[in-house]
Image (tube, helix red, strand yellow):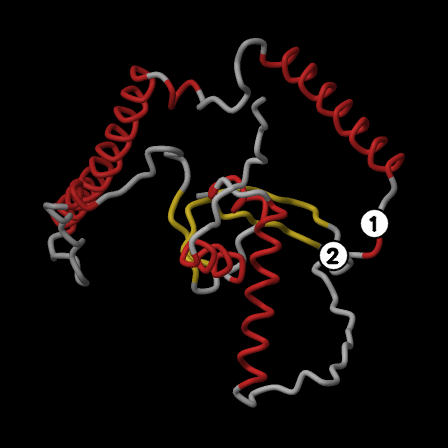
């Protein structure tokens, strides 16, 4: 007759047990260590308790602690949470249902408005390569037109002075008009995203935008308003 002997699990090495306890003391979760080390949570608890008992016994033997009488006390510590956030299951269930219903309504409304689009696509003038090229051409042409206007105004001013001097004889006194900067076009700037906006300084801060002006009465009633560059 063959008798079966109870199977005994081999003892874990001391080094393995110390490492497991050190990981627990370092803040690793018991469930996480149990899975990573292949050891049951109960076994880890036993090792932790044995190690604590051994350390306590050695400390008492060395005269570091007195283990005859010990006292236990506790204190309340505030959590980073509000009391009003403590809710029962019905309240949480209703809140989840409400949020899901709102999300479903929002999705349906966005689908009806945008179709297959996401709703956060770039504007057509930014998304399409050809439209971006057209916008850059517009910016280039505006800068060229601004510089051309400056040079045309200078030439017109010189012509008016020359005509007046030819008719009246003496040359006009005063400062002659400033010659346009030869590098004026290269120094001009424009915003390629919003060519109509300008760099504006307000209270020491520089912003890209517009100059909003309003006219109000003594009773703070706005009677006129405009947006300029």
Mark 2 Cα-neighbour bin, 10 Å: few <14, some 14–19, many ≥20? few
Q: Which residue is mark 1?
A: 86
- Secondary structure under tag 1 reads loop
Percent position of residue 95, x then y: 82, 34
Place residue 90 in its image quadrant. top right
User: Do the numbered discs 1 and 2 sit on residues whose CB atoms are within 8 Å?
Assistant: yes
Percent position of residue 18, x then y: 46, 60
Instruction: Name, please, the residue furthest toward the front.
Output: 1
Q: Is residue 176 above or below residue 93?
A: below
Q: Depth check: 105 or 30 in front?
A: 30
What residue appears at the point 43 percent right and 58 percent down from the top-left corner?
14
How many labels, in total?
2
Q: Is residue 57 above or below residue 212?
A: below
Percent position of residue 62, x then y: 52, 87
Q: Depth check: 51 or 150 in front?
A: 51
What residue appears at the point 58 percent right and 29 percent down from the top-left corner?
4
Separation of residues labelled 1 and 2 (CA atoms) = 9 Å
Which quarter shows the N terminus? top right
Q: Is residue 77 above or below residue 83?
A: below
What residue appears at the point 80 percent right and 50 percent down from the top-left corner?
85
Horizontally, residue 131 falls left or right of residue 115, namely left
Instruction: Name, please, the residue furthest toward the bottom.
Output: 63
What residue appears at the point 88 percent right and 41 percent down from the top-left corner?
88
Q: Which residue is mark 2?
A: 81
- Secondary structure under tag 2 reads loop
């Amino acid at each position: 007759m063959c008798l079966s002997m109870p199977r005994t699990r081999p003892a874990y090495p001391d080094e393995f047990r110390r490492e497991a306890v050190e990981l627990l003391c370092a803040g690793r979760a018991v469930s996480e260590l149990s899975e990573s080390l292949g050891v049951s949570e109960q076994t880890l608890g036993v090792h932790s308790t044995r190690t604590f008992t051994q350390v306590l016994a050695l400390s008492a033997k060395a005269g570091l602690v007195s283990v005859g009488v010990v006292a236990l006390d506790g204190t309340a510590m505030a959590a980073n949470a509000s009391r009003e956030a403590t809710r029962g299951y019905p309240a949480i269930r209703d809140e989840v249902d409400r949020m899901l219903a709102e999300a479903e309504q929002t999705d349906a409304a966005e689908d009806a408005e945008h179709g297959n689009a996401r709703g956060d696509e770039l504007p057509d003038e930014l998304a399409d390569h050809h439209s971006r090229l057209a916008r850059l051409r517009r910016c280039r042409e505006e800068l060229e037109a601004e510089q051309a206007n400056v040079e045309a105004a200078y030439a017109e001013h010189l012509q008016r002075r020359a005509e007046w001097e030819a008719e009246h004889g003496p040359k006009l006194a005063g400062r002659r008009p400033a010659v346009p900067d030869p590098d004026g076009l290269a120094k001009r700037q424009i915003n390629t995203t919003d060519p109509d906006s300008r760099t504006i300084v307000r209270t020491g801060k520089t912003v890209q935008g517009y100059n909003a002006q309003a006219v109000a009465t003594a009773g703070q009633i706005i009677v006129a308003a405009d947006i300029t560059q």
